[in-house]
Amino acid sequence: MSTAWKYGNWIAGSWDKLQRGRHILIGIEEWIFRERSEYQEVVIATVPDYGRGLFLDAVVEFLALDEFVYHESFALPPLLFHPSPKRVLIAGGGDGLALREVLRDPRVDEVVMVELDGLVIDACKAHLPELHRGSFDDDRATILIQDIFPYLESDPQPFDVILVDLLDAYDELAVGLYDKVLRLLRDALTPAGIVGGFGDVARPHMTIRVPYQGLKRFFENVAMHQAPLTAFGGGYGFLLASNSVAFHRTATEVVAARAAALTGDLRALVPEHFPHCFAMPRYIRDGLDGLDGLDGLDGLDEESAPATEGVTDAFSWIYPDASR
C-alpha cells in the first residue's frame, strides 16, 4: 500500500471502487479471522475507532461502531408493521445480527435463517459474540446452511415476515437473481406477509432502486425509510413490501405499542417517526423510479488505481505488501 493510501498502522484497506467520482477506503489494523470458503473470502478485522468488522470478498458488511443502526432499521420495522409475526425467514444474514434483532420481538415463535456459507456463521459465532449475543443458540432459531433457492422451491410452511439479507444488486446477474428471489419469496409469504430489503440511497448509483423496483413488480405496497451509516459512507435505505399491509396508513400508536414490547432499548429506531419517515424528497423518489438519469456504475478507471488484489468488480483489498 503506497503511503498515499495508508494511514497510521493500517496493514490493508477495503477499497470501494464502485463509483468513478467517490471512493471509500476502510483501513484494517489487525486481521482477526481470514479464510476462503467455497464461495468467498471471509474476513473479520479490526478497524481503528470502529471496532471489528465483517468483510466478504473485501466488501464491508458492517462495523461494530454502528452496526446496530443498520440491523435495527432493517430487521425491526417489518416486524412492527405486522399484526402477528409468528414465523420469520432470514434469507442470508449469516452473521446472526439480524437474527439478534428479530428475537427481540416476543411475538415471534420461530426464526429460520438460511445462509449459503457456513464459514460466515462459524467465524461470526467465534469472533463476534458481543455482537450476535448468542442469537444462534436461541431455542426459537433454526439455522440452515444451504442455498435459498432450493429451500424456497421446497414449498416451506409460509412465513409472516421475510428479510432479504443476501444480495447487493450491483450488476445484471445480481438483478436477475433478485427477481428470482422475490418471486419465490412472494409465494412463501402468508397473505398478510411483509418482506424487508435494503440498498444504498447515495447518488449517483443509488443501488436501492433495483430492489425497490423489483418489490414494486411483486407487491402492491412498498415503503422506504432511511438511516445514516458510517460503514457505507452515507445514507442507507430500508424497504418494506406487502400485498396486505398499507404502511403509510398504519397509525403511529400501533407501531409504538408493538415496539414497547421489544426486549432491550432501541438505540437507532424511533417508532414514533413511523409512518411519517416514509415520505421521501423528490430527488429520491425520482431516483427510485429511475427518472434522475444518473448511473455511476460504469467506467471504473483500473489503470489509475493503486496495486490491489482484485476480489470483485466493485471492491478490492489494497495491501502494503502484495505477498501477504
Image: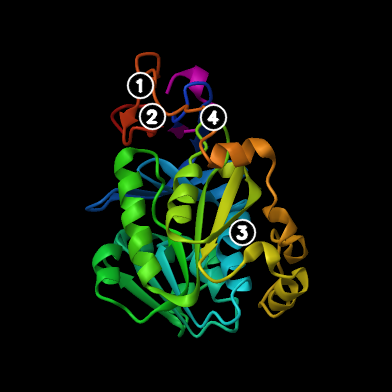
Q: Nearer the viewer, mark 4 or mark 3?
A: 4
- Amino acid type shown at disc 3: Ser
Q: CA distance from mark 1 to mark 4?
A: 26 Å
Q: In this picture, is 141 found above or below 31?
A: below
Q: Position of residue 6 (x, y in %)?
A: 51, 25
Q: Are marks 2 and 4 in contact (CB under 8 Å)?
A: no
Disc 4/disc 3 C-alpha distance (Å)? 23 Å
Which one is closest to the eye, mark 3 or mark 1?
A: 3
Mark 1 lies on residue: 307
The Cα–Cα distance between marks 3 and 1, rounded to whole angstroms, is 36 Å
Mark 4 vs 3, N-terminal side: 3
Q: Amino acid at mark 2?
A: Tyr
In this view, 169 is above or below 241: above
Mark closer to the chain start, 1 or 4: 4
CA separation in Å, label 3 and label 2: 33 Å
| Residue 31 percent coordinates (x, y) | 42, 45
In the rendered image, which residue does mark 3 sit on? 73
Name which residue type carries label 1. Ala
